């Protein structure tokens, strides 16, 4: 770099300096002192780092393949307080064809709050690098996929990897793959694997093998798994039982959060985001 040994003003800070250097900024040659050049270089470094992180995040989001309507979902999109009592949900009928009372709704709010807190703890454990193996069960429209994707978005924001898959599509893709082991590892080696709609796959030896091998990879690599089903946990155990799957998933690992039950009716179509984006 050519040095000019004169007392000239830095064209950025305007101070007189013993030494200034000619550099090009936005296509224009200017004279700057060392301090201002270092500041510009640091600013450029930070901009490049922000750009790198943005591109990385965009790539990770694309790879995660979350459902489009949940790609930007946050905890604010899952209402778990008594605002529910003020919504159109009050007039909805329960499973027996009768209207909910306010007291019944308050009891449901308590259940929803408990599930939300469990999911927040799952998120924190994954961010802390712990392995979480859990199954979300409950009626369609109760928010299982929404909460799983909210967790996933927080994991992605922490620059960790996520894969979301519909169970039927996942089984078909792996079954048709020419590299079975490679496909299993590809989908199961991320920081968080979400397998949605277990009800969509049959109870066959092939399905049991794929689920067992995927859960085994997740377990052995200390990664995390969320499986989602409208069926109770006992139905899942019966449909997909293998000794390895039982040991890895059903033997009591993370007992408190192993099976999170969404024990309320579908909220789709209600004013607030209980089980569905607003």
Image (cartoon, grey):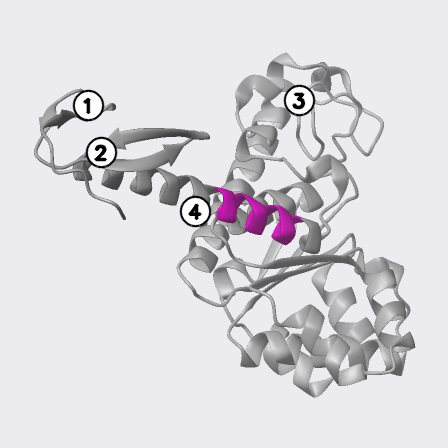
- Which of the two marks, 1 or 4, is nearer to us in this view? 1
Decide if residue 258 is on the left or right side of residue 245.
left
Q: Quadrant of residue 192?
A: bottom right
Q: Is residue 55 above or below residue 237?
A: above
Q: Earlier in the sequence, mark 4 or mark 3?
A: 4
Q: Nearer the viewer, residue 240 or 193?
A: 193
Q: Which residue lies under the disc numbered 3?
A: 272
Looking at the rendered structure, the secondary structure element under dot 4 is: helix
Q: Which residue lies under the disc numbered 1?
A: 13
Q: Position of residue 61 (x, y in %)?
A: 64, 48
> Which span of residues is magenta-colored?
51-61
Q: Is residue 144 above or below residue 126?
A: above
Asked whether residue 197 appears in the rendered view, the answer is yes
Give the CA distance from mark 1 to mark 2. Answer: 7 Å
Q: Is residue 190 above or below residue 16?
A: below
Residue 115 shown in magenta: no
Pointer 4 and pointer 3: residues touching (CB < 8 Å)?
no
Q: Earlier in the sequence, mark 2 or mark 3?
A: 2
- Which of the two marks, 4 or 3, is nearer to us in this view? 4
Residue appearing at x 54%, y 69% in the figure: 223
Q: Which mark is residue 49?
A: 4
Residue appearing at x 67%, y 20% in the figure: 101
Q: Position of residue 23 (x, y in %)?
A: 33, 37
Q: Nearer the viewer, residue 125 or 50?
A: 50
Looking at the rendered structure, the secondary structure element under dot 3 is: loop
Q: Which mark is residue 148?
A: none
Pointer 1 and pointer 4: residues touching (CB < 8 Å)?
no
């Amino acid at each position: 770099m050519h040095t000019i040994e004169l007392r000239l003003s830095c064209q950025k800070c305007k101070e007189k300096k013993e030494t200034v250097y000619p550099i090009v900024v936005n296509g224009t040659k200017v004279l700057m002192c060392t301090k201002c050049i270092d500041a510009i270089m640091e600013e450029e470094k930070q901009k490049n780092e922000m750009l790198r992180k943005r591109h990385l995040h965009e790539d990770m989001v694309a790879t995660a393949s979350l459902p489009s309507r949940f790609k930007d979902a946050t905890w604010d999109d899952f209402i778990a307080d008594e605002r529910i009592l003020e919504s159109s949900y009050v007039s909805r009928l329960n499973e027996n064809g009768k209207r909910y009372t306010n007291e019944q709704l308050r009891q449901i709010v308590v259940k929803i709050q408990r599930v939300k807190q469990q999911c927040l703890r799952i998120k924190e454990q994954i961010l802390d690098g712990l392995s979480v193996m859990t199954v979300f069960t409950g009626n369609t429209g109760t928010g299982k996929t929404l909460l799983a994707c909210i967790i996933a978005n927080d994991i992605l924001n922490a620059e960790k990897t996520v894969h979301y898959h519909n169970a039927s599509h996942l089984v078909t893709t792996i079954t048709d793959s020419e590299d079975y082991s490679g496909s299993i590892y590809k989908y199961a080696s991320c920081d968080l694997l979400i397998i949605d709609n277990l009800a969509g796959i049959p109870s066959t030896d092939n399905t049991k093998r794929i689920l067992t091998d995927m859960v085994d990879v997740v377990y052995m690599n200390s990664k995390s798994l969320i499986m989602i089903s409208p069926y109770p946990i006992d139905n899942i155990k019966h449909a997909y039982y293998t000794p390895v799957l039982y040991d890895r998933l059903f033997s009591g690992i993370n007992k408190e959060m192993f099976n999170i039950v969404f024990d309320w009716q579908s909220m789709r179509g209600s004013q607030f985001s209980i089980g569905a984006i607003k």
